[in-house]
Image (spheres, rainbow, N blue to C red):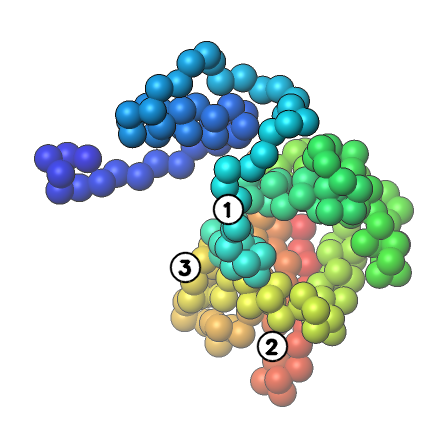
Amino acid sequence: NFNGKHVVSDYARIKNPALFAGETLKKLLIASGIMIEGKVRKGTIPKQSFPLYVHKSKPLSIIVEDMNKFSNNFIADQLFMSAGTKNYGIPATLDKAVKAEADYLKKSGIPSNGVVIKDGSGLSRGNRISPFIISSILEKAWSNFDYGPSLISSLPIMGTDGTLKKRLINSPLKRNIRAKSGYVSKTSSLSGYIMTEENEPIVFSII
């Protein structure tokens, strides 16, 4: 805040969200005149504890749109871990998240041979997944009314918004592609849907 006229925002990865939340709450309470004793630390919640407040997040469809439009890796990792807890309970672990993803592929009839998942964002160079599998997932989403419309609308629109805002601006393909870009050192990708002149969707994945 410069002279009360300009607010500067910055984004940073938080290595320990639980401690960050605790320290932030402590500072807010102290600023409000509430005395706090002791230090913030991670631990097991005592059985006699009770919730003071429950905060509900945005709808999942909005969270996924925030993630995909601007390629938010932090959200991707958190949703990945959340999928594991939804299927196998808390606490969140990488093994549970990986198993939840494997369960989805099996349930959807998508072959998962050779698939290796190390995180939810795709930043790990240990990840292994083929364009065929990604295309198969996108094809399933197109015909699944439960989550398909929300996923498709969350994807950046070519030459219009999100990470694809500046691509193919003067091309006939502008606004006719919804896709998610990806980049890890020396490796780039683009996966999504192209709408033909006959209004027929084509699924594609390029890595």
Residue 37 visible here: yes
Amino acid type for the residue under numbered disc 3: Lys
CA gap, disc 1 and disc 2: 39 Å
List the single residue furthest toward the front.
48
Q: Are marks 1 and 2 in contact (CB under 8 Å)?
A: no
Of badges 1 and 2, nearer the viewer stands: 1
Crowd around label 1: few <14 · some 14–19 · many ≥20 (10 Å): few
Q: Which residue is mark 2?
A: 195
Residue 131 image position (x, y, % from top left): 74, 54
State the residue position of label 1: 55
Q: Gap between marks 1 and 3, in whole Å? A: 36 Å
**What residue lies at 73% left-to-right and 47% top-to-bottom?**
86
Residue at x 61%, y 80% (from the top left corner):
196
Q: Amino acid at mark 2?
A: Met
Quarter of the image for residue 120 reads: top right
The amino acid at mark 1 is His
Q: Nearer the viewer, mark 1 or mark 3?
A: 1
Compared to residue 201, the image places residue 148 above or below, namely above
Q: Is residue 97 visible?
A: no
Q: Nearer the viewer, residue 49 or 86?
A: 49
